[in-house]
Image (spheres, grey):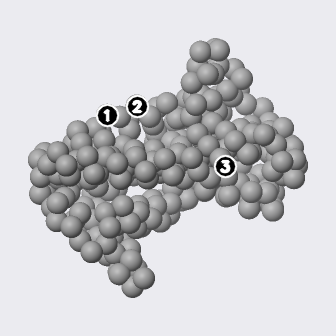
Amino acid sequence: MNKYIYIFKAELLMMFHELKFYWVNTLFYTISNMLLFFGIFYTFSTGLITSGDITNLLFGLFVWRQGSNALSELTYIIQDEALMGTLEQVIMTRVSFPQLLTIRLWANFVFVSIKDFILFVLTAHIFGIFNELLLLGYQWFFILFMVFIILIGFYGLSFILGGLALLYKRVGSVPAVLVNLFLFFTGATIAVSEFPPFFRIISYFLPATWGMSCFRKLLIDNIPIGEILTSQTFIIAVTYNLFFLIGGLMTFKLFLRIAKDRGRLGHY
């Protein structure tokens, strides 16, 4: 257990020092993300009448931000280690490679969540919906649980992309495609019912769609949490995202074994 805590602390320390030494780059990168988030929120909130619609949009974009990081971070870690020529050494450490990556993802999640939470609160204040968030009361527990469920699906996909990075090295464009797909076709910004039939079918195959539907039921349709917990949508959301997490881990281990057999770990 101590070695896992040590890795976790080391990863947080590394990110803190990167923030300290490259603060100019970090500052402008943060400003860029803030402008993008504000712009998307303002664009899609125009025309929304009820506070439930606007609150649902804010949570949808928050989950999208978190999910975007989840999708790309593992691929970035593997590509970075490969570029430095340390990927094989990392894989041969006493901690199994999937466990090591999981710990590093947890550390990154904590670090990014702090920044995204600040962005979330700023957006709520700037657009005047902070009081509505305070009125949610006990519903916050259900919302946070659904955020967790959606994110485990994102991280499951991240392990699949990480496996592809082991085999094909440069796959950074794949997370970029998925990020856009999840922004527009999961119900985070536009209700799935408003999509043309073809895009509606695509959205139902995305794990985040079902979790976003639970947000919509709670915040827009005002359905009691007890009814949502027994609904088909909630059951599919939990099952589907767990399936992606377990399937992602199994796929990553398979790709890791294939990469070892083909001798791809030492090549970039």
Q: Residues within 10 Å of mark 2 (few under 14, many from 20)?
A: few
Residue 243 or 154: which is nearer the viewer? 243
Please provide percent x and percent y for residue 171: 28, 38
Q: CA distance from mark 2 to mark 1?
A: 6 Å
- Is the residue under label 1 in contact with that under label 2 (CB below 8 Å)? yes
> Which image quadrant is residue 134 in?
bottom right
Which mark is first along the chain, 1 or 3? 1
> Which image quadrant is residue 1 in?
bottom left
Residue carrying label 1: 173
Residue carrying label 2: 177
Residue 259 or 35: which is nearer the viewer? 259
Indicate the amino acid at tag 1: Ser
Please provide percent x and percent y for residue 200: 63, 22
Which mark is first along the chain, 2 or 3? 2
Residue carrying label 3: 238
Indicate the amino acid at tag 3: Val
Q: Residue at x 31, y 34 (%)?
A: 173
Q: Residues within 10 Å of mark 1 (few under 14, many from 20)?
A: few
Q: CA distance from mark 3 to mark 1?
A: 28 Å
- Horizontal side of 62 relative to 106 (left or right) equals right
Return the mark for residue 53: none
Q: Residue at x 65, y 47 (%)?
A: 239
Residue 96 seen: yes
Please provide percent x and percent y for residue 23: 29, 62
Residue 205 or 212: which is nearer the viewer? 205
Q: SS of the residue at dot 1? A: helix
